[in-house]
Amino acid sequence: MSQEKQTPKEQAVLKTSYGVMKIAFWPDVAPKTVENFKKLARDGFYDGTAFHRIIKGFMIQGGCPNTKEGKGGVPGTGGPGYTVKAEFNTRSHVKGVISMARSSHPDSAGSQFFICHGNARFLDRQYTAFGELVSGEDVLDRIAGVPTAGSEKSSPIERIALESVAIVPAAG
């Protein structure tokens, strides 16, 4: 009987201007989404972006290339140049869950993601949840508490940098 070689589990380390958050992935329910996020992270796509949308008690959103300093374009409208098919699943959108942001079309996610800052179960089975925070809840809380402005009152009044996203072996 041959033993299957298991690939080591990996985590994402999100280094922000407010501290570090670590995310454990759920490849069992969203394999293509997890691989896409890891590929973009390894390519440096997320490095130097910012969290451009914050709704305290709901979520913080990032991953838009238009948020890089010196870039044009409206924050929240950029992506990697392709989309990923939705992988809706039964994982609940509760505090600390990371999920893919998208437009009204279910298969429109690309690079933008959000981390739930509260119970957002109304998004279940409509957005692709693909992991959860394993450390840095205090960082999530601090970012979610940044004052916001704009028409939706969700644009942070200061830049909250996502300095880097590294994919590392999971501790364990």
Image (cartoon, rainbow, N blue to C red):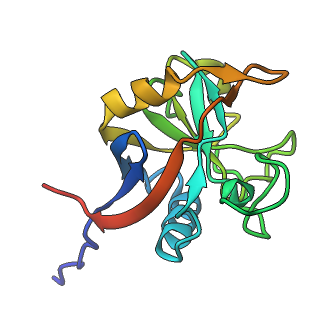
Q: Is residue 25 visible?
A: no
In front of the other: 90 or 48: 48
Horizontal side of residue 149 vs 89, given as left or right: right
Does residue 113 lie above or below 56 as drawn?
below
Q: Is residue 26 left or right of residue 108?
A: left
Q: Is residue 117 above or below residue 129?
A: above
* Residue depicted at 62% across the width and 53% down the height: 63
Q: Position of residue 134 (x, y in %)?
A: 29, 40
Q: Which quadrant is the C terminus positioned in?
A: bottom left
Residue at position x 82%, y 50% in the image:
77
Closest to the observer, 165 or 121:
165
Q: Position of residue 65 (x, y in %)?
A: 70, 60
Residue 132 against residue 11 in the figure, above or below: above
Mark count: 0
Residue depicted at 70% across the width and 25% down the height: 154
- From the top left corner, tell me how far across and down residue 135 is, in percent: 27, 39
Quadrant housing the N terminus: bottom left
Residue at (69% x, 53% y) in the render: 67
Is residue 50 something one can see in this rendering? yes
* Residue 165: quadrant of the picture: bottom left
Q: Is residue 157 left or right of residue 133?
A: right
Pick whichever, 25 or 138, lies toward us.
138
Q: Quadrant of residue 132?
A: top left
- In the image, 7 versus 83, the foreground residue is 83
Residue 56 in picture, x, y percent from top left:
56, 18
